[in-house]
Image: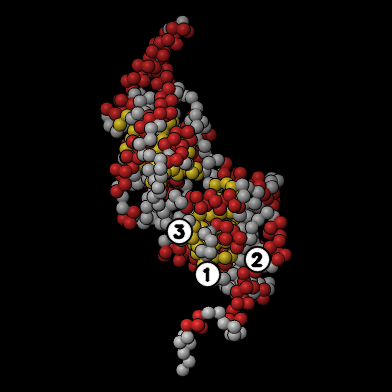
Amino acid sequence: MIELFEDPRLDKPSDQPAPASLVKFRQISQDALKGAGEARIKAQKDKGKMTARERISYLLDKDSFLEIKSLMESSCSDFGIKDKHIKGDGVITGFGRINGREVALFAQDFTQLGGSLGLAHAKKIAALMDRALEAKIPVIGLYDSGGARIQEGVDSLNGYGEIFYRNVKASGVIPQISVILGPCAGGAAYSPALTDFIFMVEGISHMFITGPGAVKAATGEEVDFDTLGGSRPHSEKSGVCQFVAKSEQDCFRQVRELLSFLPQNCEENPPLDTTSDLASRQVPVLERVCEMDPKKAFRIHHVIWRLADDFGFFEIHQNFAKNVVTGFIRLGGQVVGVVANNPACLGGALDSDASDKAARFIRFLNAFNIPLLTLVDTGGYLPGVQQEHGGIIRHGAKLLYAYSEASIPKVTLVLRKAYGGAYIAMGSKYLRGDFNFAFPSAEIAVMGPRGAVEILYSRDLKAEQDPAKKEELKQKMTQQYSDKFASPYQAATNGSIDEIIEPSDARSKIIRAFAVLRGKRDPRKNPHKGNIPL
């Protein structure tokens, strides 16, 4: 019998030749790490793109990547695929850390068969997602693929089905993040669409179901890749993409920042942070909100920045449906999601896109135990034939559903105006807001006082022929209506508002309210609800 470990000196590197099995293993491993070779790597870099391994290295904490299934390859015997012995089959899978927290990660390698998805490729991603779901850690996908591998026929399509199924099973259980770093076409685009957040990079990211060639053949329209499926149309028009970056490095920085606001899974609370920004900090500048004409436009971001710890706001869906603003802040170190009407766009009115945007974000917050702050300054739902025919009733109902369903702590603050159905929809007491505050200048009514007067007192106004006196009468009636029917004191009297607060105390009042609500829901007993794309 040979005693291998009797001499501790054997723990040091040996001068003896390595066993043949180790030599073979090391050669195979090195070949796998090299990928498709220098020529194809150069072609990738000539496009201004990183390689898959460079992306992983840049995104993850240093030396934290644990790769799995690096030697897996396709079993396809047609078109010479198997003969090429492509280790990894065009995708790198494994686990790493971001800011010290575990994540699962896959990165498609465009230098190998264009990153196309075959059955082995899909099995690697599916296995990774299974482990991530069991370990309850976030999944990040780096997409750079030519789509389904046509050499493998229906097997590649079946592979997408396996991934889609796991996207749905993981929805609302673990955060899922998709980063588009090249083409993502055809059925492949539906996997990112099933995840919680999509990042794109200007100039290199493209998503579409049918490419420019197919569009021209089917409709006669001529369109380029950027116009059809680039970061701009998807962030501004379709709403598919939540984040746009100037470069891959900027994109990875944003991904890391997003994860700093999120829990690892639905059974945890989001991470607390320390701050030197006092909870008692006064915000006297918010008194200016009380001076403003309710019709005057201003960017709601100025209110959000001043309420947040250290004036920090991580906005989501910045370029889409700008009449509603969504994102993350911290209040007293606690992560809070914000949904706010933005008077700088459409007067803060709700429309179909804004309703979808806010509703899906609220459902994400509810899935992952993140409290919700709603800032209200809206004149109602956007009127018009286009909105009605576009389904504003159907889309607006999603927002009502999301607020009513949410069992997370909900605090609402009415700044200047909350009219009509939009008042109810924006986190009102009757959709089970926990604490509902208002500034002294707030107007809460079925409609704006001036418009209400023109309807209620139309005969009196028509009877007055003198234009100056008519305007004077209208102003008087408007003030009377406002004092009696649109006053926040009236809303406080009937319990629709819990408290009218000093604007300068808004930050401290909101932080105190969330502190009271901290034990409202036990994440471990939260019934699972998927975050369906809305």
Q: Which residue does the image show at 59% across and 69% down from the upper left?
A: 88
In this view, the mark in front (3 or 2): 3
Compute the Cα span from label 1 to label 2.
Answer: 18 Å
Q: Residues within 10 Å of mark 3 (few under 14, many from 20)?
A: some
Count of numbered circles on the image:
3
Residue type pointed to by label 2: Gln
Q: Nearer the viewer, residue 229 or 279?
A: 279
**Residue 154 place in picture, x, y as percent:** 59, 66
Residue occupied by mark 1: 68
Residue occupied by mark 2: 112
- Is the image coloured rainbow, by chain, by secondary structure, or in one colour? secondary structure
Asked whether residue 14 is in view, the answer is yes
Q: Which mark is residue 101?
A: 3
**Residue 209 place in picture, x, y as percent:** 60, 53
Q: Which element is circle 2 on?
A: loop
Compute the Cα span from label 1 to label 3.
Answer: 18 Å
In this view, the mark in front (1 or 3): 3
Which of the two labelled residues, at mark 1 and mark 2, occupies the earlier sequence position?
1
Q: Is the residue 223 above or below the residue 288 in the image? A: below
Asked which quadrant contains residue 186, the reply is bottom right
